[in-house]
């Protein structure tokens, strides 16, 4: 390859068309990532939301939000319910994905730039690169392109299976929205009325948004735990160099295959990182357990299939699915709330002992939240000293 300057220049021009991220946009070409994700969902068919589908979903979210008023003291978090296509989900959730992915993406791109553009090239290649000038300057952009391709493919895969904006337990959007295509995939094989399935999923979406909109510390707490974990990820430089050695860098497909993955992510087993994972897993379980408890209460006596649908959702979450695979790809983190039943049992015990008001007051401050140990012994938490000084925290004494 390096013996033909004309061929090399042509390859560089092709790369230049893709390496078009604006200055200061960070380590990843997000426009390209979005385009790759959208192309992935369009290839499988991603029709625009029809007016009838939109009306059904908006009505379901509004009715679900009304039902939730009887099950929780937290006010509505649904102000502008929407129905999205998969492409719209990608477009509207990328800002949060960007926040989650960029810590590891930046480290990956820096390492790629050093490995591809450093001393790994043979002398004749380095000489040719110097003559072609733009090559060495584009190496970091090339790394950003490769990471962008990886992110785009992961988001495209996830978009084909998500139901709304809260499937993974993290607040991916301020807008409550459901995807007709996602509801159809979830419903496949369930011999239950379509309107009940849609309403149950709307209850879950609306309940999540009550938490994310009205518990002011929760969003930063969850996203901060993911970011802290991602910052502890290192790139296995030796594995990366081994992958790159001997590659034809004018072949984007070969580069993509070599740099695609999870084998290059190497989590550090530090106490800080373990603590971040434990905190994230516990909080995700508490969010999911609260949502399940509130949705069950709201649906009781109104939605005959609620029990069957709750079990379907539990199985879907417990087996990991697309969310876990995507997080493994994007930030090297397996995202699976492993203790959903324990968390739900704790919230139910709080309702029995303190009522709905007492249960929901726990969300008033992060220091009031149950810990992983409390999930092991919920009765101790419910009957313990935490029943008391909410007024002190509200008054600024704690």
Image (cartoon, helix red, strand yellow):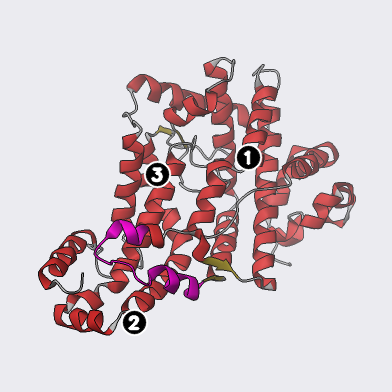
* Residue 145 covered by magenta stretch: no
Residue 126 image-quadrant placement = bottom left
What is the x, y in percent for residue 150? 40, 55
Q: Quadrant of residue 260?
A: bottom left
In this picture, residue 296 sits left or right of residue 78: right
Q: Which residue is mark 2?
A: 118
| Residue topped by disc 3 | 156
Main secondary structure of the magenta stretch: helix
Q: Horizontal and vertical percent for residue 274?
A: 68, 66
The Cα atoms of the two marked residues, 3 and 1, are separated by: 19 Å
Of the image marks 2 and 1, the number of the one nearer the N terminus: 2
Q: Residue 317 bears which disc, if any? A: 1
Does label 3 or label 2 sit earlier along the sequence? 2
Q: Secondary structure at mark 2?
A: loop
Q: Which residues are magenta?
A: 236-256
Residue at the far left in the pictured view: 6
Query: Which is nearer the eye, 50 or 379?
Result: 50
Number of other residues with Cα within 10 Å of mark 2, as a class: few under 14, some 14 to 19, many 20 or more: few
Q: Is residue 25 visible?
A: no
**Residue 8 vertical position relative to residue 76 in the rendered view, above or below:** below
Give the residue displayed 65% in from the left and 31% down from the top.
295
Q: Do the residues under discs 2 and 1 have CB atoms within 8 angstroms?
A: no
Against 199, residue 210 (above or below) is below
Q: Secondary structure at mark 1?
A: helix
Q: Is residue 59 above or below residue 176?
A: above
Residue 255 sits inside the magenta stretch: yes
Q: Is residue 44 visible?
A: yes
In the image, residue 25 above or below residue 135: above
Residue 59 image offset from top left, x and y in percent: 47, 23
**Side of 127 relative to 201 (left or right):** left
Q: Can you tell which of label 2 and label 1 is closer to the viewer?
A: 2
């Amino acid at each position: 390859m390096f013996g033909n300057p004309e061929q090399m220049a042509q390859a560089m021009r092709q790369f230049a068309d893709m390496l078009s991220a604006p200055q200061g946009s960070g380590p990843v070409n997000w426009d390209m990532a979005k385009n790759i994700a959208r192309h992935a969902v369009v290839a499988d068919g991603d029709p625009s939301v029809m007016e009838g589908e939109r009306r059904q979903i908006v009505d379901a979210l509004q009715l679900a939000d009304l039902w939730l008023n009887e099950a929780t003291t937290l006010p509505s978090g649904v102000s502008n319910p929407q129905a999205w296509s998969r492409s719209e989900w990608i477009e509207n959730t990328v800002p949060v994905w960007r926040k989650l992915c960029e810590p590891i993406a930046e480290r990956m791109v820096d390492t790629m730039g050093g490995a591809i553009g450093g001393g790994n090239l043979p002398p004749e290649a380095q000489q040719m690169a110097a003559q072609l000038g733009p090559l060495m300057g584009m190496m970091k952009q090339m790394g950003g392109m490769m990471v962008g391709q990886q992110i785009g493919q992961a988001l495209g895969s996830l978009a084909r299976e998500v139901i709304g904006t809260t499937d993974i337990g993290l607040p991916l959007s301020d807008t409550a929205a459901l995807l007709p295509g996602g509801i159809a995939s979830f419903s496949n094989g369930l011999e239950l009325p379509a309107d009940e399935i849609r309403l149950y999923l709307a209850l879950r979406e609306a309940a999540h948004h009550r938490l994310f909109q009205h518990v002011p510390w929760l969003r930063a707490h969850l996203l901060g735990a993911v970011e802290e974990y991602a910052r502890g990820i290192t790139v296995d430089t030796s594995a990366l160099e081994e992958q790159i050695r001997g590659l034809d860098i004018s072949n984007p497909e070969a580069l993509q295959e070599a740099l695609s993955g999870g084998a290059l992510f190497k989590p550090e087993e530090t106490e800080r990182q373990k603590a971040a994972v434990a905190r994230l897993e516990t909080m995700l379980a508490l969010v999911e357990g609260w949502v399940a408890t509130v949705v069950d209460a709201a649906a009781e006596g109104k939605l005959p299939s609620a029990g069957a649908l709750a079990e379907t959702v539990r199985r879907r979450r417990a087996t990991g699915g697309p969310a876990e695979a995507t997080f493994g790809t994007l930030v090297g983190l397996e995202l699976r709330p492993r203790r959903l039943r324990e968390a739900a049992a704790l919230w139910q015990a709080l309702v029995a002992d303190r009522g709905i008001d007492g249960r929901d007051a726990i969300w008033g401050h992060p220091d009031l939240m149950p810990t992983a140990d409390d999930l092991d012994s919920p009765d101790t938490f419910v009957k313990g000293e935490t029943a008391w000084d909410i007024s002190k925290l509200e008054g600024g004494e704690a």
